[in-house]
Structures are given as C-alpha cells and as structure tokens.
Amino acid sequence: MSLVAGSYERFIWGFKLKTLKHTQTLTLTPLFSFPSHLSPIKAVAVAGSAAVSGGADDTIKIYDLSTSSEIGTLTDHSASVTALSFFTPPSLSFPRNLLSASDDGAVCIYDADPFVHLKTVSAHKKGINDLSVHPSGKLALTVGRDSCLAMLNLVRGRRSFYCRLGREASIVKFDLGGDKFFMVMDEKVSVHESEDARLVLELENQKRVLCAAPGTNGLLFTGGEDRNVTAWDTASGKVAYCIEDAHSARVKGIVVLSKSDGVSADDDPYLVASASSDGIIRVWDVRMATKEKPNPLAEANTKSRLTCLAGSSLKCECWVCLIYCYFSLLFVLHRILFHSWKC
C-alpha cells in the first residue's frame, strides 16, 4: 500500500506501508520527499503505481511509485490545479484516464497510457473545488465556487448537466458502487441518488468537514476541523463509529484501504489513513474504533503543513507495467524519429 501527501511548502511525500518481520507490526516507510512544485500543492491522486500532484503553479507532476521518481509534467491548465481523479477499470491495476480541475473552471481529460491530453471542458464559471469520476468511467461530477453542480459526459467529452445549489459545495464523491454521491457544504454532508440527484438524507457534523472518502457497506469517512475521523452509515444517517481526537490539528485528508501489501488476506485489517495540517500521517484499524482511545497502527511526521492525501492498495501487476513501459517507449521513439525526420 502506498500513500502520497502534498504540502503547503511545495513538498510531495511518498510512503509505503509495510509489515515488519517477526513483530507483524505496520510501519510507514518513506519512499521520497522533494519540492516538486513551485507553489503549494493542492491535490494528489494515486492509482496502482502511478501518482500525480497538482499545484498553484498551474502544473501537474507525474510520479512512478515503483521507482520513487518524478517522470513528467503536464502543463495544459492556465490556473491552479485544484482537484485530481483517476479512472481505473476493475480488471486493471493501472489507470486508464486522469481528470484534473482548475481554478478557472476547466476540466482536462487525459489518456493515462501514456499521459496524453485529450480534451479540455469548461465546466464552471468560477474555480472548481472538487471532482469525482463515476466507477463506470462514463461521467464525472464537479462542484465549484459558483455554487453549482456540473455533470460531465466523458464519452462525448462535454458538459451534460449544470445546476445551481444555493450554497457552495467543497467536496463531491461517488460511493464505491456509483449508486449514490455525496456533497459537502461546510459542516453538512448531503447524500443523493446518482440516477436523478434526489436528496436521500443529510449528515450533520459539529464542525466543518474538510475531507471525505467512501468505504464499503455504505460507510462514508469524514474528517475536518473537529480533528476526528468519523464513519457515517449513509443508510440511516447516523454515526457508525468515530475516532475522536485522531489528530491534534484539523484533518486534511482521508484514504480508505481494504487491502494492504504485506498483510495476509485472511486477517487483513480495515485500514484508514488520515493526514492533518500539522504534518502527521496516521494509519488506523477502524475495528478498534469502539475502544475509548485506539492507537494508530503506523505514524509518520513530515514536519510540514499537509494539504491533501491519496493512496492505493492495489498491487501492481507485472504484465501491466511491462505493457505500459513498452508503449511508452514506442511513443517516445516515435516522437524522436518524427522530429528527426521533420528537421
């Protein structure tokens, strides 16, 4: 399992969650850390061995987690990159597409094999706060500072729906099955049917929600200014369980992982990783949330102001990596030969 975090100080942080031999305890092993952007990092995304980060310098950086290196830069945005999301088909461990949103209301669609810009769609009149891709890969939702919700048809590459919400939403997420989606407006989380956007119920948090991640069995994990990691039952609208005071500062990122490298499938714990603005990343076994004060399974201190967190529990298939490297090499050779002949 890999975790990637971005910081206000322009640093990107990569970690690998491993099991220590003999002790069977988990530890976050550093993979890399370096100033990858010229301005603060606002969004990160991970799928398999691929990771990306978007910053206030209008660029997207691409990383290969298997080699712990930066492998490219995308410069198709003309404003700060505010949200990133991969689409990975269920049969593959490497993403097929990457979507990115920016502070000027635009969404860029990329082919992730290799990273080639396909189209730019104007989704909002103002900056986009968040985006989420449906598990089918056919559509995506975005929310922006214009207090509107937009739906993108990814098959045709255009905006197909646009409506005013009345209040500005900061987060939008599909559930794992794609039947429902969630929107966050300050301390309130609304649950909607994906088919017709009908409001199902609302979740009332005590303080502002800053991050959210869907889990299995209809759970939604949230974190924010209350410094807690809360699991909501979206069927009843009640709190399933809560890790109180999970951090000493506000929670800025949550990642839900059900499978981890180095842990057998029989006793695989249900893992949730959280990151706070004080630079601490912690990994929790949520089965221990019923205890008065559960202890994190692993912890890392980046000593920076973290702004976002992403992770992947998918193991990289060797044949997928070989195919990806093969076509990437062909693409590079084609570009070199083409430019040589053109000259």
Image (cartoon, helix red, strand yellow):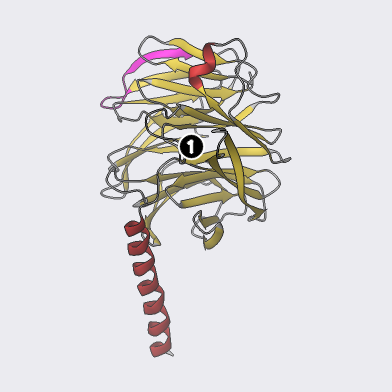
Q: What residue type is labelled 1?
A: Asp
Q: In this view, does 39 lie to the left or right of 340?
A: right
| Rendering quarter of residue 69 | bottom right
Task: State the residue in front, 148 or 316.
Answer: 316
* Residue 329 on image: x %, y %: 39, 72
Residue 219 against residue 114 in the figure, above or below:
above
Q: Does the magenta stretch include residue 200?
A: yes
Q: What element carries label 1?
A: strand
Q: Does the magenta stretch include residue 259?
A: no
Residue 247 against residue 78 in the figure, above or below:
above
Disc 1: CA contacts within 10 A as few (<14), some (14-19) or many (>=20): many
Task: State the residue in front, 291 or 244.
Answer: 291
Q: In this view, does 155 lie to the left or right of 173?
A: left
Residue 204 seen: no
Residue furthest to the right in view is: 303
Residue furthest to the front in view is: 22
Residue 86 against residue 327 in the figure, above or below:
above
Per the rendered image, the range of residues in magenta is 193-203
